[in-house]
Image: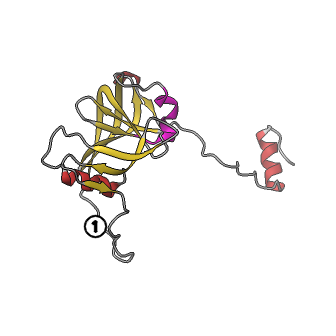
Amino acid sequence: MAPHVGTAVAAALAASHDVAVGIRGVKLRAGNVVAAVAVDLPDGRRIADTGPDHAPPPHTPAPPPAVERTPATTTGRIERLLHGGKGEVRGVLLLGGEQVRFAAAEAEPLAQGMRIGAPFAAAGERVTTTAGSVLVARAIGTSVDELRDLKPGKQKPGKPKPDPKPGPEADHQRDADAGRHAG
């Protein structure tokens, strides 16, 4: 659901525990995911996604949230896979409630084997705000001993830069590299 809908639902259920809500939305093609457009609360009220109430004026930036960032490692078993807007795996919820997030493109090869109940480990940065905390993973695996970096050292996609046009300096350097000396 959109962040403003999530905020409204969290406020409506702040004092409740283990409640059932109805979710109305659109099932995405790329996964077992529903994009929520309305949430029916236990008391009969409905919170619908009609867009955010208002955005701050463009010339008045919103104050930055208080954020604490600390290095962290976690292990556990996967309770639920977390998905992005197109159904791609973007993180996991571990048994016990800890949330781990990662970029889908970085984790795609590793996310293939993720399933509910499977062991999971991650290392990265724990980001804590007033709304809660999440571990932003830089490496994931099935155990701490088998962590794999999500951003391996790879070249950025795109066209390779062409070599500069060869001139006398390039000819001289090429000859020097070959062990010859230009006279």
Q: Is residue 96 above or below residue 47?
A: above
Q: Which residue is mark 1?
A: 63
**How far across and how far down the image is residue 90, in percent?**
42, 40
Q: Which residue is nearer to you in this view: 35 or 91? A: 35
Q: Count neighbours of disc 1 (C-alpha within 10 A) and say few if under 14, some if 14 to 19, many if 20 or more.
A: few
Q: Amino acid at mark 1?
A: Pro
Q: Which residue is nearer to you in this view: 5 or 183? A: 5
**How far across and how far down the image is residue 52, in percent?**
35, 64
Q: Which residue is nearer to you in this view: 70 or 94? A: 94
Q: Answer whether residue 67 is visible to the viewer in this image.
A: no
Bounds of the magenta segment: 102-112
Instruction: Tell me if residue 183 is in the magenta stretch.
Output: no
State the count of labels: 1
What coloring was used for the rendering?
Answer: secondary structure
Identify the secondary structure beneath mark 1.
loop
Residue at image point 26% right, 43% down: 21
Q: Is residue 152 above or below residue 130?
A: above
Residue at image point 30% right, 49% down: 39
Tell me the chief SS of the magenta region.
Answer: helix
